[in-house]
Image (cartoon, rainbow, N blue to C red):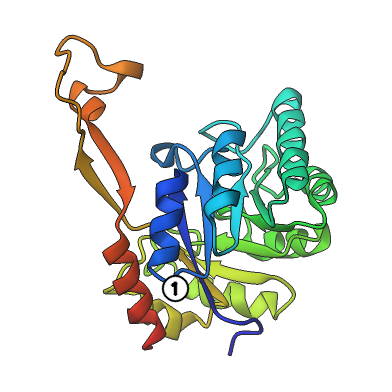
Amino acid sequence: MPHHPFKIEICVEGIDGLVAAQQAGADRVELCASLLEGGLTPSLGVVREALLVATIPFHVIIRPRGGDFLYSELEFASMIGDIKAMRDLGVVGVVIGCLTADGEIDEARTRALVDAARPMKVTCHRAFDMTRDYRAAIEALVRAGVDRVLTSGQRDTAVEGIDILKDTTAIADGRIVVMACGALDQGNIAQVRRATGVDEMHFAALKTLKSGMEFRNPHVGMGGTAIEREYEITVTDEDAVRATIAAVRAA
């Protein structure tokens, strides 16, 4: 049985996603920008607005760029600065992750981020899934004082990672919250919950809408994207969030 009260967190991009998630019954939100890159730090304006409209807690991802989790000194300094800004705004939690080049949790940097964050809660994101040894990574996160780890069991999906998720939960033994993720939906979330006994679950339920733009320039795709992408918007699907939450609550 889990050592912590069961909660469901929804990963969202921006204010509208936060509102959709809370209306659909989420317990908490991870607030991001650029989910196409796996989530980057949202702007201060977005966070301020989120604080005005949120009726549930939200944690802010602190990730200065896409790609790996091996950061330069300047990137790391920016992470410390972003964490302090979130703390000063009154955000309740942040989501971080730093690795060494040989695939271990960077304990020194993780501890520094945790220290900068307090009294906020601190989650380690799926940088954990990119470590060489998940057992050693759990111990490193516990030593660094991290409150929660987000993981798909070091596989692309939680279903594929069930065995590692189960073992991770056993190793954690209540010392750190284990939050499962990885292509969770209405059809599989209850299975993963029953098989692993994780403390919390996390998913993004996204859908693509056509842009409301009437004028469209056929000659320009911004940022190297296909022109079609310029006229699409990815949003949180409130109905899918609600259905997936109902499925796991019924398990």
Q: Position of residue 105 (x, y in %)?
A: 71, 50
**Eyeballing the image, is 55 above or below 73?**
below
Q: Position of residue 143 (x, y in %)?
A: 82, 62
The quadrant of the picture occupied by the N terminus is bottom right
| Residue at image point 57% right, 38% down | 41
Judged from this view, the residue extending furthest toward the top is 219
**Image quarter of residue 171:** bottom right
Regarding residue 128, the answer to whether it shows in the image is yes
Left or right, 197 with respect to 156, comes to: right
**Eyeballing the image, is 152 above or below 27?**
above
**Eyeballing the image, is 101 above or below 191?**
above
- Could you say which is closer to the camera, residue 203 or residue 92? 92
Q: Secondary structure at mark 1?
A: helix
- Could you say which is closer to the camera, residue 156 or residue 238? 238
Q: Residues within 10 Å of mark 1 (few under 14, many from 20)?
A: many
Regarding residue 156, the answer to whether it shows in the image is no
Residue type at mark 1: give it.
Answer: Ile
The quadrant of the picture occupied by the C terminus is bottom left
Judged from this view, the residue extending furthest toward the front is 52
Q: Position of residue 68 (x, y in %)?
A: 56, 36
**Image quarter of residue 85:** top right
- Could you say which is closer to the camera, residue 237 or residue 35? 237
Task: Report how many numbered discs are placed on residues in the image.
Answer: 1
| Residue at image point 42% right, 71% down | 25
| Residue at image point 74% right, 23% down | 74
| Residue at image point 71% right, 57% down | 122
| Mark 1 lies on residue | 162
Left or right, 3 with respect to 183, comes to: right
